[in-house]
Amino acid sequence: MPLFGVVQQEAHGHVVTAILLAMVAMLFTAISYGRMARAHPRAGSAYTYVGQEIHPALGYVTGWSMLMDYVLNPLICTIWCSKAAMNIVPLIPYWAWAVFFAALFTGLNLRNIRATARINAALAIAMGMVILAVLIASTRYVMGLPGLGMAYFSAPFYDPQTFSWPLVATGTSVAVLTYIGFDGISTLSEEVVDPRRNILLATVLICLTIGLLSAVEVYAAQLVWPAHEPFPDLDTAYVHVAGRIGGPILFQLVNLTLLVASIGSGSGGQLAGARLLYGMGRDNALPRSFFGVLDTRSHIPRNNVLLIGAICLIGAFVMTYQLGAEMLNFGAFIGFMGVNVSSFLHDYVRSQKKTISNLLPPLAGFVTCLAMWLSLRTAAKMFGFMWLLIGVLYGVWRTRSFRDPIRFEAPPE
């Protein structure tokens, strides 16, 4: 919902198409993630898979790229939550809300994993009820509109007057942010019961559920607010849709719900980033004494949680939501492509079973992710490559041009 206005502008109204195209790409990648988690059930995610299946140096570069993804997710959530909270209590300034939400994400992730899971489950139930209310109100509103033909209902999928493949591709590259976070499941392989089965199942089902539900949500919104009508504010476009169909009450309810959703997303991203840093620290790709340490009571990488919390707080004052979202996708696509190549090597090239089911998903996932990565805006690529260069230079110094081994150690029993 927070991306609705931006994607509608970039794709010239074809938000549903962009969401579904992104889902296809992410489903192929989710299969690769699940298979690699089954082969390597440990913290680290894409960093581990690429490091073990391709080369440790490339694993480090992939981990550094994904780190940008995991750090920027709670950062942009801090920004969005602060602005959404100002819609509710405008007397409290932005800086105070930024401090509050950065501290909230950090505090949630200093609790144990089971407590975090219970909090997320409660948030999901509350958000589901609001989504249902929005869909019911949207249906009543559209049914009351006069003289609607088939072209009106098919326009969100394809409008011949505005359709442009390059624009839809750019919109799709932004719409992928809807799915960002599904890969974080693989970073929790050491906390999950039966990870060889459940990581694959959960990753694929999460992508499918997000894609179908998001397509329904944006389709309803486009019927209520057609693409040719400008929004008062792109960042909060869906909130204005809710106001049109349900008045001030639904406006504030959806605003609050998106605030709650961003809290869940931000806290989850921060935890995944902390686990990724822990995996890299344990393997000596980053200083082990700081990054590779778990709290003895909660088994949480406390140092990493606090570090990401500090970055979120600082970034909330120096970065915009849009730039953060675009840079986030830059790092995510690099990690996704690396995981697909790793799955191709492990499940097809080095496997005795040369089946089409082991060949098609990783190849299709790599090609679609590459296409969307190339469709990102120039600014996102420029800042993304700067982050990548910093990471490579540090890795060269840390490992003496990668001559010192990065040990992908198995976790203790």
Image (cartoon, rainbow, N blue to C red):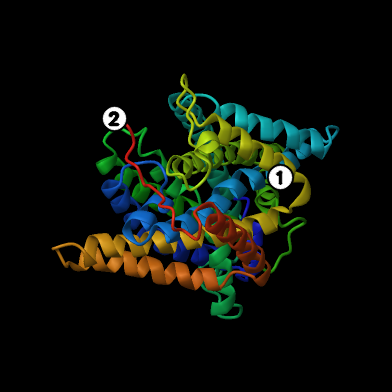
Number of other residues with Cα within 10 Å of mark 2, as a class: few under 14, some 14 to 19, many 20 or more: few
- In the rendered view, does 204 fall on the left or right side of 277? left
Q: Position of residue 128 (x, y in %)?
A: 50, 38
**Which residue is under mark 1?**
79
Q: Position of residue 271 (x, y in %)?
A: 52, 37
Mark 2 belongs to which amino acid? Glu
At 53% from the left and 32% from the top, the residue drawn is 123
- On screen, 190 above or below 75? above
Q: Quadrant of residue 152?
A: bottom right
* Residue at the outermost top position: 297
- On screen, 342 above or below 186? below
Residue 352 is labelled as none
Closest to the observer: 112 or 176? Answer: 112
Q: Position of residue 113 (x, y in %)?
A: 45, 28
At 49% from the left and 24% from the top, the residue drawn is 295
- Helix, strand or loop at label 2? It is loop
Dots 1, 2 in contact, CB < 8 A: no
Q: Quadrant of residue 105?
A: top right
Mark 1 belongs to which amino acid? Ile
- In the rendered view, does 255 fall on the left or right side of 123? right
Query: Looking at the image, can residue 103 be seen?
Result: yes
- Helix, strand or loop at label 1? It is helix
**Which residue is under mark 2?**
413
User: In the image, which is nearer the foreground, mark 1 or mark 2?
Assistant: 2
Q: Position of residue 87 (x, y in %)?
A: 77, 39
- In the rendered view, does 379 fall on the left or right side of 21? right
Number of other residues with Cα within 10 Å of mark 1, as a class: few under 14, some 14 to 19, many 20 or more: many
Query: Looking at the image, can residue 146 be seen?
Result: no
* Residue at the outermost right position: 91
Q: Quadrant of the C terminus?
A: top left
Could you tell me how far apart the alpha carbons at marks 1 and 2 are, in whole angstroms? 39 Å
At 41% from the left and 50% from the top, the residue drawn is 406
